[in-house]
Amino acid sequence: MDSAYGVPRELSGLQKQRALYQPGLPPCLQDTTVRVEFGDATTSADPAGAHVISQYFPRTYGQPLAHFLRAKAKVPDAQIITEHPAIRVGVVFSGRQSPGGHNVIWGLYDAIKSHNHNSTLLGFVGGTEGLFAQKTLEITDDILSTYKNQGGYDLLGRTKDQIRTTEQVNAAMAACQALKLDGLVILGGVTSNMDAAHLAETFAESKCPTKVVGVPVTLNGDLKNQFVETNVGFDTICKVNSQLIGNVCTDALSAEKYYYFIRLMGRKASHVALECALQSQSNMVILGEEVAASKLTIFDITKQICDAVQARAEKDKYHGVILIPEGLVESVPELYALIQEIHGLHLQGVSAENIPSQLSPWAAALFEFLPPFIRNQLLLHPESDDSAQLSQIETEKLLAQLVETEMNKQLKEGTYKGKKFNAICHFFGYQARGSLPSKFDCDYAYVLGHVSYHTLAAGLNGYMATITNLKNPMNKWRCGAAPITAMMSVKRWSHGPAASLIGKPALHPATIDLKGKAYELLRQNASSLLMDDVYSNTGPLQFDGPGADAKAITLCVEDQDYMGQIKLLQEYLDKVKSIVKPGCSQDVLKAALSAMASVTDVLAVMASPSSSGQPPF
């Protein structure tokens, strides 16, 4: 074991107080008896890809949903597990650090020990590299004591975030077999949970007894689907960023002479930017999904901002706050095409200093137009998933410079008669991801740890621990597990090096739904936000009292609880069966047939491949 891991932390007064907080549990997890109801076999939200997914994952596709039940639930077909032999479980951080990750381990540990004190939880130190090398740390009460409700991943650490190659998969399986693990719990985002699905399929094929469970932990908030409403860490990241943005908004309103361009961490999707815009009520937010949908160029975006500056100047306002997601650079068509051409040359082994001379004419012209600092950042070697190093590309400075150049031009021409445009740029990301987790993330992560144990106790493999109905109080949360294969889709076309995924099942990062209620809320208030300076400073994270139980706006405005709706549908179907029995009246039978024929016709059209949408790119 590396002595740097698992050592007691030096805690501040607030950290000590937070370490004493004990998250609660929903009723379905409070008893030592595990009660699980299995639903029907799952399919995919991508009907046209279902056959392909089943071919790639023949042993883990089509498994049923699992609902964990409270003690008083009367479900005749429920599986009741009262015997809990001692088990050995491994846990690994396989994604970028996200506030609340430690509480997943804590919840898993408490669940394992409460069902059998002789069970063992092993943490793999150093992330997936530690998994391959079989470097472990046995989790104990003493080790956990200074990591409860704390941020970071320093209990176990993390390294390379992938279990992808044949060698890596074999090394992971060898570790699980050598350590005699009954279960392996993987904490991470989209890529990590996709790796968990592949690992589960390989284990099943090889008859390795280790069951694999994934947990949705990512600050980006992009591991969302019908089963997963939000991710561990997203709530904290958005609250910490919104406080910083609120402070900047107050400063802007005080000085009245600066425009602040703030880039927010969050990878390709703009979930963090949208949530922070709703919480802080900044003047503008440029969402990558809007830009991609409207095919806006960098010049279109510049014009939008310049028009806003002009409109505000007419009201004698020379300040403002503009939010920019870090993934914006990959949403602008011409910039994305340039990035893909650069990455293609990287793959051919062309050195960074020689890439500019080998670009196509149009790409070379765009490259030369860009400021030198952006050119250097675009030339950075791509990430392992072939995306750009988004955290290193200062899109906020590019936009600020382009807007300043245009406003100075308009000032010189006399078309803009206001004061000189002044910009200040920030990048918020690293400041938030090591934060103490919010009360919601402490609770959510801890409960997911318990759900992970229940999933293993039920003997499930290739599942993700899930909780729905999260916007309601904890006693109404619905805990369960869903097959990761049910969350997959199949891309049928792509551009750039991502074309390697064409025809293959995968989890895809969820983008903002431009028809969803959260986006609609933003658009309804866009004019007022732009012109009226209705800034909101949410203040620092609250752990007690007013504000402590606040949840993300984007979580609360949507109608979700998919697992609950599936159960409700089953209740309706059961009710129909109880009414329409042999011996019922002819009128009842006719009414049932007419209604069912109509419903099945509509559903058949909606579920047909031609009507199914493509996954986001």
Image (cartoon, helix red, strand yellow):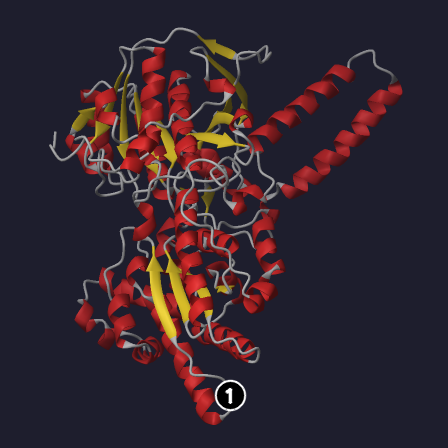
Q: Which residue is mark 1?
A: 417
Query: Can residue 199 be seen from the camera position used here?
Result: no
Q: Secondary structure at mark 1?
A: loop
Q: Which of the image's four quarters has the N terminus? A: top left
Question: Of all residues shown, which one is farthest toward the top?
Answer: 83
Question: Is residue 370 placed above or below 269 in the rendered structure?
Answer: below
Describe residue 588's horizontal placement relative to residue 556 as left or right.
right
Q: Which of the image's four quarters has the C terminus? A: bottom left
Question: Is residue 200 placed above or below 218 in the rendered structure?
Answer: above
Query: Can residue 521 be seen from the camera position used here?
Result: yes
**Residue under the image location 43 percent in, 49 percent down:** 238
Number of callouts: 1
Residue 183 picture location, percent across and down = 31, 22
Residue 349 picture location, percent across and down = 18, 62
Residue 230 picture location, percent across and down = 47, 40
Badge 1: how crowded within 10 Å, few (<14), some, or many (20+)?
Answer: some
Question: Is residue 585 placed above or below 255 in the rendered structure?
Answer: above
**Residue under the image location 49 percent in, 49 percent down:** 615
Q: Amino acid at mark 1?
A: Lys
**Residue under the image location 34 percent in, 49 percent down:** 432
Toward the viewer: 533 or 238? 533
In which quadrant of the rendered view does residue 359 lie?
bottom left
Question: Is residue 180 placed above or below 149 in the rendered structure?
Answer: above
Residue 92 picture location, percent across and down = 27, 32
